[in-house]
Amino acid sequence: KALLYNMTPEQQVYADKWNKDHPEDDLVSTEDKLDAKTVEMAQGYDVVSVLQVFDIDEEEVYRKLSSYGIKQIALRSVGYNIVNFDFVHKYHMIVTNTPAYSPRAVAENTLTSAMYLLRKWGPILDNEREHLNFVRSEDLMSDEIYNQTVGIIGVGRIGSCVAEMFHALGAKVLGYDLVENPANEAFLEYTDFDTVVKNADILTLHTPLEPSMENMISAKQFKEMKNTAYLINAARGPLVNTQDLIDALKNKEIAGASLDVMTGEEAIVMKKFKDISELPVEYQELAKMPNVIFTPHSAYYTKTSVKNMIEHSMTDVKRVLNGQKPVYLVEE
Ligand code: NAD
């Protein structure tokens, strides 16, 4: 019997399917987030599952979950930085996540972003929609992907899919990772961080976020990048220094950017605004630039991903309840 916090209508479809396919299980949903105010709802359940951006940092949450006999927090996400592992250990709990729900979803979104930027669809669509201007002016002339160099920082599950896709299109692919996987050498050439940054026509980030990696791409890197290069960040916002990015775009140190994530994204994601002046200041500046694309942390957002978030997390819940080792144990 599992309580699934942060339920959304699209995930509910797959939770209902799970209940139908597994009559021995009972997945119960709530739209609430898990915190000290809502933790008591978990009384009587074997396990809780969450998918939230808000930190679960109140000790009371872990203490109460443990007192209800709950031993596992099943995250329906890749990221686990919302969890306080000191409290997880103190109350002898475990955390599982869903790191492989669909690397291709983010990789395909990265490919889409790259092609959109490269083929200048930002200014082309602005001209058409806002100014009814259909003139094929010289500034709209673009490049072809097959003779571009794509630089990938972090060649893990997602980064290796990205490499495979761009390689298939004929691009040269450079990759940097702390750990080099020989299987990826069919699609890319591993090199050092600075070489990737300097040589990329499209620089795309696919690392996790650790405190030491904040501002991995800042003023120094923007100065080293080609003036014609595009930056894509669908990993984690703080990897990029937002103010340095704004300055680099204004100074034409790079040609454009696609941001699925950004520091402070909680202020805009899943919200609607009436006027640009309501956006946080950095977003206002970037939103005015036709060579910048925002997506609302939606790179992962495909039917396959949503289905797998439920299926992978609940499969691990069953493993744990049956006394087996979970496949996606988060070890911190
Ligand atoms: P992964 O763990 O499979 O791969 C990450 C890779 O980064 C690993 O190969 C690791 O060795 C490497 N790495 C770690 N630190 C590094 C460093 N300092 N320098 C270079 N490489 C380093 O993770 P993944 O599933 O491929 O996810 C990658 C990123 O994508 C994560 O930040 C994740 O949060 C993000 N993500 C975003 C979305 C979205 O919708 N935008 C969805 C899923 C995942």
Image (cartoon, helix red, strand yellow):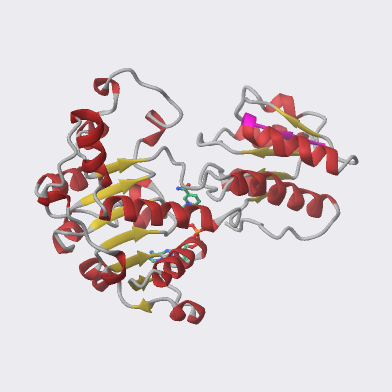
Q: Quadrant of residue 151?
A: bottom left
Which region of the structure is painted magenta?
1-9
Location of the N terminus by quadrant is: top right
24 relative to 232, above or below = above
- Quadrant for the C terminus in the image: bottom right
Q: Residue at x 26, y 71 (%)?
A: 147
Residue 123 shown left or right of residue 168 in the figure: left
Instruction: Examine the image and state in which quarter residue 191 appears.
Output: bottom left
Given residues 26 and 148, the one toward you in this image is 148
Query: From this viewpoint, is residue 73 visible?
Result: yes
Q: Is residue 7 visible?
A: no
**100 in relation to 87, above or below:** below
Q: Is residue 318 left or right of residue 49?
A: right
Q: Is the residue 69 above or below the residue 164 in the image?
A: above
Nearer to us in this view, 31 or 329: 31
Q: Residue at x 52, y 64 (%)?
A: 157
87 in the magenta segment: no
Q: Residue furthest right?
A: 24
Residue shown at 74% from the left, 53% from the top: 316
- Can you give x and y, in whole percent of width and height, for residue 105 in the image? 52, 53
**Can you give x and y, in whole percent of width and height, for residue 290 in the image?**
21, 40
Q: Quadrant location of residue 170?
A: bottom left
